[in-house]
Image (cartoon, rainbow, N blue to C red):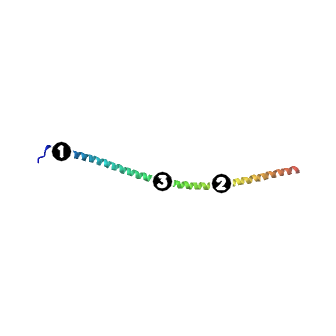
């Protein structure tokens, strides 16, 4: 059987389409390789971000611990200051009572001195 022109043209068309398909596949493979590279880069970025978030979480935990320790120290000192204020208040009250007694004694002494003098 002799090949005819139609058969040859169909085979040429099939060959041309196959080449176009292969070129398209090559371009698609290049795009896929680029996409894989970008996904790998994104994965590395996510890993670095995860490490940074982990370090930040550790820092926040340490800060919370220090804040609690500071609050405990402040509360302890505040209780001490409140006790000192109460002591000073009590001393001032005693001083006022003594001052009134001294003033009374001074008046009485002055009155005695005036009668005897």
Cα distance between the residues tagged 1 and 3: 68 Å
Alpha carbons under labels 1 and 2: distance apart = 103 Å
Point out residue 76 in the picture as x, y percentages from the top left corner: 61, 56
Q: In the depicted view, which residue is nearer to us: 9 or 43?
A: 9
Between disc 1 and disc 2, whose residue precedes? 1
Secondary structure at numbered mark 3: helix
- Name the residue: 73% across, 53% down: 93
The number of numbered discs placed on residues in the rendered structure image is 3
Asked where in the image residue 12 lies, by quadrant, the reply is top left
Q: Residues within 10 Å of mark 1 (few under 14, many from 20)?
A: few
Between disc 1 and disc 2, the foreground one is: 1
Q: Which of pointers 1 and 3 lies earlier in the amino acid sequence?
A: 1
Mark linked to residue 10: 1
Residue 28 falls left or right of residue 48: left
Taking the spot 62% from the left edge, 54% from the top edge, the residue there is: 78
Specify whether 90 is left or right of 23.
Answer: right
Residue 57 badge? 3
- From the top left corner, tell me how far across and down residue 19 is, in percent: 22, 46
């Amino acid at each position: 059987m002799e090949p005819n022109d139609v058969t040859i043209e169909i085979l040429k068309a099939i060959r041309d389409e196959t080449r176009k398909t292969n070129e398209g596949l090559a371009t698609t493979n290049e795009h896929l390789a680029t996409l894989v590279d970008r996904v790998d880069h994104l994965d590395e970025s996510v890993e670095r971000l995860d490490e940074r978030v982990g370090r930040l979480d550790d820092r926040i935990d340490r800060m919370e611990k220090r804040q609690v320790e500071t609050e405990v120290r402040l509360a302890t000192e505040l209780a001490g200051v409140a006790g000192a204020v109460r002591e000073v208040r009590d001393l001032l009250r005693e001083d006022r009572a003594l001052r009134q007694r001294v003033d009374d004694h001074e008046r009485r002494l002055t009155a005695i001195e005036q009668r005897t003098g």
